[in-house]
Amino acid sequence: MHLTPREHERLLLAAGADLARRRLARGARLGAPDAVALVCDEICELAWDGVPYEEVVSRARKVVSPGQLVDGVASAVPALQVEALFPHGSVLVHVDAPFGEPPLEGPGSVRTGHGGVELAPGRERATALLRNTGELPIWVSSHVPLDQLNPAVQVEVPGEGRFRLDVPAGTALRVEPGAERQVEVVRIGGGA
């Protein structure tokens, strides 16, 4: 059987989730790899079933409770991401605190200052025009280079180089059929 790399990864994730379910069924606690596999598998299945993004994220936080984990897993996994196939296309799903809020102090903890955090500091930014020439809505994920989008999306970016949306990781925007959207973009890699 010939599998694409994406299909291979999806089956590996499903196998890890199956291991986690077997461990939970016999009352064993989960380590980080099997707990992450279980949550990611559930996210992929919810997306496949067409559950809205916000509900997928909400439900993902309820898949594994802190009491089902080996000590330290919640702190070791403050967030997770998986690319899931929704009916409208692939979207990077980002889940903060997938196993409940980790403690504020302890091994691996990070304290942040007050105020905002600049995303991709020092990188060139521009305004791009996205035009959906297709018949269906198209979602553009935060991490996808604009030169690798669905061919139905025409992209106009001033200047040279590769860009992506200038939005937080794990978010996406929808471009309706026949619609145009002006979006802020940021150069991929390197400084200005």
Image (cartoon, rainbow, N blue to C red):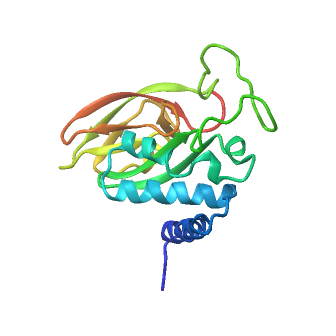
Give the mark count. 0
Q: Left or right of 177: which side holds 3?
A: right
> What residue is at 37 percent from the left and 54 percent from the top?
47
> What residue is at 75 percent from the left and 46 percent from the top?
72
Q: Nearer the viewer, residue 74 or 148?
A: 74
Q: Nearer the viewer, residue 141 or 128?
A: 141
The extreme bottom residue here reads 1
Task: Name the image quarter holding the C terminus.
Answer: top right
When asked about the image quadrant of residue 118, the answer is top right
Return the x and y of residue 105 as percentages of the image width and height: 77, 29
Q: Residue 146: in sight, yes or no?
A: no
Q: Nearer the viewer, residue 170 or 14?
A: 14
> What residue is at 43 percent from the left and 29 percent from the top?
158
In the image, residue 165 sits, relative to residue 69, either above or below, namely: above
> What residue is at 61 percent from the left and 29 percent from the top?
120
When asked about the image quadrant of residue 27, the answer is bottom right
Q: Nearer the viewer, residue 190 or 168?
A: 168
The extreme right residue here reads 107
In the image, residue 75 sits, relative to residue 36, either above or below, namely: above
Q: Left or right of 30: which side holds 60?
A: left
In the image, residue 88 sits, relative to residue 21, either above or below, namely: above
Q: Residue 11: in sight, yes or no?
A: yes
Return the x and y of residue 122 as percentages of the image width and height: 64, 24
